Image (tube, coloured by chain):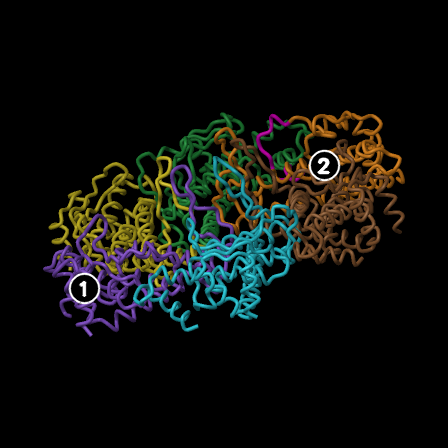
Chain colours: A cyan, B brown, C orange, D green, E yellow, F purple
Amino acid sequence: MSDFEEARDTILMGTVREETISEVEKKITAYHEAGHALVAWSLPGTDPIHKVSITPRGMAMGVTQLLPEEDRHYYPKKYLMNRLSVALAGRVAEKIVFDDVSSGAQNDLKEATSLAEKMVSQWGMSDKVGPLNLGRGEEHPFLGRELALPKRYSEEMAWLMDQEIRELMDRAETEADQILKTNRKALDNLAGALIKEEVLERDAVERIIKESK
Amino acid sequence: MSDFEEARDTILMGTVREETISEVEKKITAYHEAGHALVAWSLPGTDPIHKVSITPRGMAMGVTQLLPEEDRHYYPKKYLMNRLSVALAGRVAEKIVFDDVSSGAQNDLKEATSLAEKMVSQWGMSDKVGPLNLGRGEEHPFLGRELALPKRYSEEMAWLMDQEIRELMDRAETEADQILKTNRKALDNLAGALIKEEVLERDAVERIIKESK
Amino acid sequence: MSDFEEARDTILMGTVREETISEVEKKITAYHEAGHALVAWSLPGTDPIHKVSITPRGMAMGVTQLLPEEDRHYYPKKYLMNRLSVALAGRVAEKIVFDDVSSGAQNDLKEATSLAEKMVSQWGMSDKVGPLNLGRGEEHPFLGRELALPKRYSEEMAWLMDQEIRELMDRAETEADQILKTNRKALDNLAGALIKEEVLERDAVERIIKESK
Amino acid sequence: MSDFEEARDTILMGTVREETISEVEKKITAYHEAGHALVAWSLPGTDPIHKVSITPRGMAMGVTQLLPEEDRHYYPKKYLMNRLSVALAGRVAEKIVFDDVSSGAQNDLKEATSLAEKMVSQWGMSDKVGPLNLGRGEEHPFLGRELALPKRYSEEMAWLMDQEIRELMDRAETEADQILKTNRKALDNLAGALIKEEVLERDAVERIIKESK
Amino acid sequence: MSDFEEARDTILMGTVREETISEVEKKITAYHEAGHALVAWSLPGTDPIHKVSITPRGMAMGVTQLLPEEDRHYYPKKYLMNRLSVALAGRVAEKIVFDDVSSGAQNDLKEATSLAEKMVSQWGMSDKVGPLNLGRGEEHPFLGRELALPKRYSEEMAWLMDQEIRELMDRAETEADQILKTNRKALDNLAGALIKEEVLERDAVERIIKESK
Amino acid sequence: MSDFEEARDTILMGTVREETISEVEKKITAYHEAGHALVAWSLPGTDPIHKVSITPRGMAMGVTQLLPEEDRHYYPKKYLMNRLSVALAGRVAEKIVFDDVSSGAQNDLKEATSLAEKMVSQWGMSDKVGPLNLGRGEEHPFLGRELALPKRYSEEMAWLMDQEIRELMDRAETEADQILKTNRKALDNLAGALIKEEVLERDAVERIIKESK
């Protein structure tokens, strides 16, 4: 593991080590995607993994693809909690391995925050907010762009929702953290395989995880 | 009932059981619509049931149709409280049977919240807010879309209304919950019949409920 | 009066009794308009009644017309308090007779709230707000619609005004309530006559009230 | 004075007395304008009276004209306090004589509130707000109408300004009240002369006030 | 000084004394500009005086011109504090001499408030707000006018900034007050010379101040 | 160092000393850029210095260029904290040397505040705000300009973010302060060299710093 300690230091040091930025970033990406994949695999009821890749494409440095869910119409709260954990798992992996978080999780956080916002304010999944659909986060098209609807609830209610959204995110992060720490060896092996192979299909992911037990 | 425990677990597990997602979702829909129908039937003064269906149409997975109310001009508070209970009953049924809530109740919550908002802020039906019409939720057309009117009340008043809207929703949910738990057998039988028949007319609904006593 | 108890139950039960919705709504309308008329007649200084009718026209189920006030330029606070009581009297009559309020009072509440808002925030008629014209409720034309002016007072002041508006409405409602309860016989007789005749001219209204003493 | 008690009751009673609304409103207008004139005459440094009239013109039922101030560039705080008192004096006179206030003071209140707002928020005349120009009440032209500028101060500051504006208005009202009560005979005589003559020039006003001592 | 006591009373009395408004206003203007000039001269590091004039031009009744600063790129906090004191000095002089403040300081207050706002919210010069640039007071061009940017900070932060802006203004006002009271003779002499000469060049200002010691 | 004490006094005194404003401003610029460069050099993992210059260009009086980072995709929190320290170092150097801060740091503060805002509200780097992406500071194009998105969080959350942004800025400022005070000799030497040479390449900066130990 000293190899990864080195990676951690290198990323913080910039280019002063013998590794280049792009070598370091490849390691971060590998751990980030391995985090997503391992938590997705571990949680019951999550959509199955299709492929994990650390080949940069567009803005994304890597991607963990789950099987399409086009024929699902109900998203139960327990299923959604799992989605939050999977979304945060890349960032949690960075934290565990490199003892730091990076700006690279911006989109994961954005999607997860938006999902938690819907759970709390549109789907009645917070006991503190209750069975209300307050439409927070809903948007209407206007002059060719999406326009947020004016809020119809009080500041107190907005704060209550903020706290509940935070609560869901914290719970999801804790779950991801426990899974990744408990399965650290699988995490390292997945990341290592990704660095070597760049792409792992579903079967390879499952095999590596099972062999790491 | 072990059949339904199985359904509950399957929905949480995704496709890892022998049932497909669509089989599981059919069960959820059946219970959801059975909840609407049973509460509508049980509350005095509610518009009578016309038909209950779990045939998907457009975005909706099912529908419980009540008889049209086109010739009604007064909506008494007691009648409206019943409407809230009927609207929330699908979600309550999901909670009772599957021990979880899903995103599928989004539109029910939206309509019920909007109705409770009108009761509190336009029809003077909250003792705490008093006999005021503060116009919350009213909209004006502007540049081809509905534009929320600027609010003319304070944040404190907005919070008071939020609490009262929440209070109405909680009371309606509790009522639905009591009816469905008291008549669990009727709920199961209605859901079972819906899974088998997909559509139940008014007479069938009434017969099943009466035979379940 | 058992006739009216029946009406009250029927309206809550929908169509399950032998009376149709429209028969029940006619009774509610009759009491609603009788309430307006009786309070208008009872308060000193109110504009005199012209006609009371329960013939539906457009959105309105009935109407109580007071004599035009086109040559009045000063609206003293005492006169305006009476107007608030008259406006709320229809809803108060529903509450007394049917032990419920309905959405039918929406426009009464809207006009009364708007009047109370002007009293408090434009005409200096609240001791707590003081002799200020803060322009709340004023509107400017803009792009073909009325546009609320941006508020120039604080949230604290908005809340103070909300409380004072509420206070005026409560006082007016209490006054209507006392008049209608004290003259319950006149209320019943006016409503009964309206159900029979559909329209009552000023003289008929006065005669019925005087005969009910 | 029993004549005025009658006027007071008549206005509250509407047309049920032998006086018509327009006769009553003439009396109110006479007292309202007499109030403005008497306070303007009594306060040192106020612009001198030009003419007082109770001939209705446009929206206005009467007018008290002060001599033009076109060559004044500095408005000292003491001078402005007097202006506030003069502006509120019509309403105060109504209150003293008829024991009620009316909507007729709307424009007086609007101008006085706007002036007090400038004193507090643009001219640094409140010790609690301090020597700041926060621009509250300033407007910019935009798309052919005056558009309020977005506020650049906090809600706390807005509330502080509201309280100071209220404080200035209260102080001005108290001053008008003391002058009118101390000179009640002059007030009655001015109002009486206005009812008879409809218009009083400066000399007549001064003579009546001096003869009433 | 009895001459100035007379001026003070006259301005408050309007035209009832033997002096005309324009004679009184000339005195006020003279003291106002003398205040600016004396404080500008007294504070180290302030840009040097170019000319002081009480000849009305456009909206302005007088002007104190400092030498241009076109080649300065850094505005140190101490230099800016001096600018605030100079800006407030005209109003402070009015207060000291006439025991009143007038609307004539509106532009001084506006410029000083805007400068203090920048110091606190854009240049990190408040210890309580800290080294942040929160952009308050910044504007963007939009549809041909300056449009305030939407605020990105909380109400609490806005209130903190309001208090700090107030604090800077108070400190600057106190400084001007001390300078003018300590040098009252120079203030009177400068004002007297301005009334006589209407315009004073830099040398004359310096000579009068030095001769007043 | 008496030379710099003189500079400090001169800048506060304006042109009353023998140095011109532009000579003084050159000294300030030299210390400002030396501050950026010294902190950038001292912190591990910061992008390496390319060039430091005090030749005015456009609005800027000087510039410290770091090597481009175009191939970096992850910005770890520790790296970003260093960027904040470097950004604030110019202002900190002014404070240490001249015992004052100036408006010249406006852009440094703006960039640093904006970065800290992203860290707290988009990248989940504040433990108090948690792993949320609340989109504060995000902008959308609209009618040809960037339009801030409407906020979706409460005032309480906005205040929490303000405090965390402040916290990051304070920590960064403290770090810069410690580095510059510990290496005061290097700071003076860098500034001195800049005044003489106007531009320093990377090698010269490193040599001067090392020779100052």
Quadrant containing the N terminus of chain D in the rendered view = top right
Residue E30, horizontal then vertical, whole percent: 23, 46
Residue segment shown in magenta: C69-82
Disc 1/disc 2 C-alpha distance (Å): 84 Å
User: Which quadrant of the view contains residue F22?
Assistant: bottom left
Residue F182, horizontal then vertical, whole percent: 26, 73
| Chain of residue at mark 2 | C
User: Which quadrant of the view contains residue C50?
Assistant: top right
The residue located at (31%, 67%) in the rendering is A18
The residue located at (12%, 61%) in the rendering is F196
Q: Residues within 10 Å of mark 1 (few under 14, many from 20)?
A: few
> Where is A55 relative to C86, above or below?
below
Mark 1 vs mark 2, foreground winner is: 1
The residue located at (37%, 67%) in the rendering is F171
Mark 1 belongs to which amino acid?
Asp
Would residue B56 be found to the left or right of residue F154 on screen? Answer: right
